[in-house]
Image (cartoon, grey):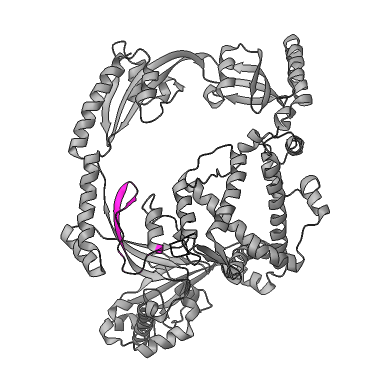
Amino acid sequence: MATLNTLRTRGGVLVIIVIGFALIAFILGDLFSGGTGMLSHRKMKVGEIDGASIGYMDYVTQIDLMTNIMQIMSGNEALSTNQQDQVRNLAWEALVMERAYRPGFMDMGLVASAKEQEDMVSGVYISPVIAQMFANPQTGMFEPKFLSEFVRRIDADPTGRSGMLWDYLKHQMIEQRQMSKYFTLLGKGVHVNRLEVNSAVEAANYTYSADYIYQPYALIPDSIVTISSGNVRSYYNAHKNRFRQEESRGIEYVLFDLLPSEQDYADAAKYIATIAEEFDEAQNPMQYATLNSQENPDQRYYKESELDAPMAALAFGTAANRGKMYGPVLSGDIYTLARVSDTKLLPDSIGLSIIILSPDQRELADSLTTVLKRNKDSFAALARQYSLDPETGSRGGDIGISRPEQLPAEISDPAVKANKGDIFTVDNPNGIHIIKLTTKSRMLSKVQIARIVYHVEPSDLTNQTVHGEASRFLLAAAGSQEKFNAAISEFSLSRRVAHIRNTDRNVSGLENSHELVRWAFTSKKGATSTILEAGGNYVVAIVTDVREAGISPIEQVASDIRLILRTEKKGDLLAGRMQGASLETAASAQDTEIKPVTGIQFETFYVENLGVEPRLVGAICNGTAPGTLSKPVKGNTGVYLFSVTEVAETGDAIQESERIRLEALTQNYLVERITQALSEECKIKDLRVKFF
């Protein structure tokens, strides 16, 4: 049954963005201040799409829309940090579609007619948007009943939220169809020709072995290779597209770990001793644990084999151990205490059959229950006739064997108490469930463990101490890179380096560091941060590099170009030395040994003991006759000279299989390249990182 609650179980991302009154007042105050504050017209721009600015409020409005939709789909009001990032991305993608892609699709005539839209909902070619939303959770297949039930209830929803969701889904299915047509249109213009297939078959069917010698670039000192400014500029002008980049920032930072002090551990031990004394005497261990544990206690019941050794001894050990308290035990920063809260005889598994009806079918449910209590054997036939779940209905209502804890409590509790063959009814927001207990394993002794978990955390005094250390460092480091470097040495701290793209929301390896990322993109090169929080610790950072989107200026890439040119010249010098009538002669002249390499195929990039060396692989597989000395090959780390020793026909690839494989690779590449090309053509500039 496709009620809103049913949809919420597969509604996807939870979305809610809460904008505090203080932020609203700040924005409005800035708007009415004549545009001189941070959120002036220029600085309120969160991006550009197809040459048009996207304002802060335009983006927030789109976020609010996505928030409402996802709230309806999920039924939840709370969002994790990751989920908030997800909804912001969805809002941005919606703006890109609205401002850039859709107008182009309309100009090309890529539309979804009224008849086509009808077919996407109720015809042969159901839209993936509709099929996914109204899928049977058991089979994953589109279930028309769920869609019909949802649409039927739209007018009866006094909140109007069902109608809002339906409008959104129709909008999404049209956009998906337009995009699909565009990809199909371009995909039809790409094919794999016979020459490519033949080359792929040959590459897959042959394996090569070779002997080689190797001379690393490091043999040539940098001092004897001269690279002029003119060389650098000439290379830059000829290869500008190689230096196209996304907007990014380079930072260096130091981390001040906020960890419990010795006094914090002593205070925690004193506190936990009091808790342990009370817990040991508590009449209701689970209730006490629920009130005092920093983590919600597990309410499940376990048999002896499912518990770790200490808990098993506590619950099922000798009579002297039973009923005692485990702990307190400190592991790392976590104290643990445990007591047996309850003991029950429970089955290991139960089997059920079920008939699912909608909430408004109470009269039918009562009638079916009456019939079933008189004739339990009619359950399968009635399930096939009346159940709203086609998959279980087709099996006579059978949902298989489950552990009691795998089922909702409203079903497992009466099932455990029932006898085999009993019929009972359960109501929940998803509908009315008529249930028959088909099997029940033997009853076993199981226990419920009341567990208290307490994390030793830094006290306010420890927090102030660490913050004071960070403050003293900041006072010495602020102002320049030189001061930052000197302060690191003075305070004996470890320097950390990070490269951040404008699409990143955290610094790699540093949890909850979004504020650090936002600061980096709103600061100039050489700026030193205030004391920021990241990953539960304090951070002080400095911006070391600012790179704007587009082609890097020559000043930023000059050192990279010098390295490229220096390596190229070193390669020429080494290649000139690696000469001889044979590989043995060349090896002797260079005072190096000949080494073998085997199992080389054309599509191989990695060479054992050498690393990633595609140029060497290509040269070996490119028709060099066995026994012939190759020309020098300039690889990633040095220059190679080789002689093919064996060419073996080891593969069994055929033209048809290679054609299918190449076509799949081509289509995958096309999808990736189209997305990239659309972004480039629409001149999309993402500045959201400065605000969110």
Comparing 26 with 569, the one in front is 26
Comparing 12 with 197, the one in front is 12
Please tell me whether residue 527 belongs to the stretch shown in magenta. Answer: yes
Up-down: is 641 above or below 157?
below
Q: Is residue 37 left or right of residue 113?
A: left
Residue 460 screen position, x and y as percent: 25, 40
Please tell me whether residue 432 belongs to the stretch shown in magenta. Answer: no
Residue 322 screen position, x and y as percent: 32, 13
Q: In this view, does 418 lie to the left or right of 579?
A: right
- Seen at 46% across and 23% down, the residue is 300
Q: In which quarter of the image is residue 680?
A: bottom right
Q: Quadrant of residue 673?
A: bottom right
Question: Looking at this rendering, what residue extends furthest in the left direction?
Answer: 490
Comparing 427 with 59, the one in front is 59
Up-down: is 448 above or below 125?
above
Comparing 510 with 441, the one in front is 510
Q: What stretch is highlighted in magenta?
A: 521-542
Q: In which quarter of the image is residue 556?
A: bottom left
- Seen at 44% across and 71% down, the residue is 548
- Seen at 30% across and 84% down, the residue is 589
Q: In this view, does 145 lie to the left or right of 50?
A: right
Q: How many marks?
A: 0
Q: Is residue 135 visible?
A: no
Up-down: is 318 above or below 138?
above
Q: Can residue 613 be seen in this view?
A: yes
Up-down: is 574 above or below 658?
below
Residue 232 screen position, x and y as percent: 39, 85
Residue 552 screen position, x and y as percent: 44, 76
In which quadrant will I find the N terminus?
top right
- Seen at 24% across and 31% down, the residue is 268
